[in-house]
Each structure stands twice: as C-alpha cells, then as structure tokens.
Image (spheres, rainbow, N blue to C red):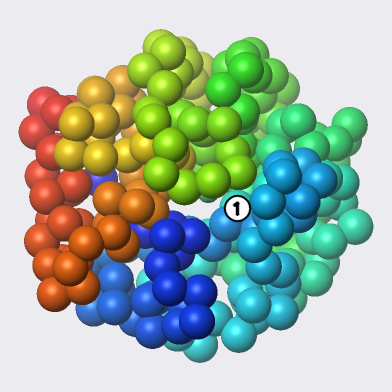
Amino acid sequence: MLIEPSILSADFASLGEACRLVEDNGCDRIHLDVMDGHFVPAITFGSATCAALRPYIRTVMDVHLMIAPADGHLTTFAETGADIITIHVEAGPHLHLSLQTIRQLGCKAGVALNPGTPASSIKCVLDEIDLVCVMTVNPGAGGQKFLDCQLPKIAEIRSMIGDRPIDIQVDGGISLLTAGPAAKAGANVLVAGSSVFNGDKDQIGERIQALRDAATIGAT
Ligand code: DX5
Ligand code: ZN
C-alpha cells in the first residue's frame, strides 16, 4: 500500500519543504495537482513549479494533469523530470495516442477518471498505462467528501486489469474512514491531501502511518 501526499493542501509558500517533510515522514510518492482554470475552475501551478520541486523529491514525482487539452504540454511536463504523468480520459479525443506519447517521453503513463466516467472508458488503453487514478471526488479542490459510489468502479477496474502491472490509485477524500474501503475495493495507491497536511506538522508522520494502517487493515 503506497501513500502519496498531495501538496495541494500544503503551504504554497514552501512547497519544496512540504515535499521533504512528507518524505522524511515515510510517504512513498509525491502528488502534484496541476489545474488550468479550464478543465477545472481552479488554477494551481504549472511545469515551472514542477521542475523547481524535482530536486526536493527523492521518491516518485507523480504529476496529475487536470488540464485540457493536455497533448500540447506533455513534452514540457516530461522535461520537468516527472516519473509519472497522469492525464484525464475526459481531457481530449486521442487518449490512446496521448498515453503512448507519455511513455515515449520516458515517463510512466497514468489515466484518471472523473466520478461520472465509467470504468469501460479505459478498456481499450489497458496495455498503454502504468496507473489508473479513480477520482473519488470531482477534481478541482482538496478537502471534499469521498464519493462512496466510486467503490464498485475501483473493484471493476481491479478485475479488468487482470495480471497487468498497473497501480490503482484513489484520489480525493481519503481519510482514516475511507482508506480501508478504498483498499478493500482494490486500490493500492492512496492520494491524500488534507488528511496529511491539515493539523500539527509534528504529527505528520503519525498521520501518514495511520492512513497506511487503515488501508492495510481494510484490505485484509
Ligand atoms: C482534487 C485533487 C486531489 C486533492 C486531494 O482535484 O486531484 O489530489 O488534492 O485532496 P484531499 O485529499 O484533501 O481530498
Ligand atoms: Zn490529484
């Protein structure tokens, strides 16, 4: 079970330090939420910020692109040193080609599904991806309520991928209450923003460990 803090809920004046802090406290990957004010209403940061954060990240830099169209920006985001680039099913007409492009650029390819998008939308790209991100909130903001109605979709995707080495990531509303059900449904990567960064900095390690424990117990 991998814990992937989203720095969306960190202090934007010190994002590098936030990456270091969660890595020093045992997280497995770092999640960067790029929003364009078009695909989603909010604007966060772009490739320059991702590139600036790269030296602060020793684990895995996972860039979640909530932008449309994404195709014209894939090279730039690959050049930031991203390990994983995740694009949305809903963000463009050429999903298969976009995912192939991400791999050709030397990154792992992820595909994200909005809550209203069915599992079947990724059936034809399963051999082009390394990660599926099931959005368990509507993308655009941290701190939203986990959508339980997405749990059957996680299970459906788990059975669709068979023995392919594809991570199933859940993104949105992950807490001590929802980590277990998400893991039980088949997720193995938990993105968590507010439940990691909200609260006392000194207890960030405890919060990461508690999420991991909740997921592990829930999965068994
Ligand atoms: C939502 C983002 C998430 C978000 C998760 O649009 O993709 O990564 O930061 O935040 P929490 O964990 O607070 O729901
Ligand atoms: Zn995200």
Q: Is residue 197 above or below residue 70?
A: below
Q: Is residue 98 left or right of residue 162?
A: right
- Residue drawn at 19 percent across, 31 percent down: 177
| Element class at badge 1 | strand
- Assign the C terminus to one quadrant of the image: top left
Q: Is residue 137 above or below residue 153?
A: below
What's the amino acid at mark 1? His
Q: Position of residue 180 (x, y in %)?
A: 20, 30
Q: Is residue 82 above or below residue 135?
A: below
Pointer 1: what residue? 64
In this rendered view, identify the residue nearer to me: 152 or 128.
152
In this rendered view, identify the residue nearer to me: 154 or 97.
154
Q: Is residue 215 left or right of residue 132?
A: left
Quadrant of residue 96 within the rendered picture: top right
Question: Is the C-beta of the residue carrying label 1 under 8 Å from the nearest atom of ligand 2?
Answer: yes
Label 1 crowding class (10 Å Cα cut-off): few <14, some 14-19, many 20+?
many
Total labels: the figure holds 1
- Residue drawn at 17 percent across, 68 percent down: 200
Residue 157 visible: yes
Q: Position of residue 84 (x, y in %)?
A: 58, 58
- Assign the N terminus to one quadrant of the image: top left
Quadrant of residue 139 within the rendered picture: top right
Q: Position of residue 172 (x, y in %)?
A: 43, 39
Q: Position of residue 61 (x, y in %)?
A: 50, 67
- Residue drawn at 82 percent across, 50 percent down: 70
Residue 188 visible: no
- Residue drawn at 50 percent across, 82 percent down: 13
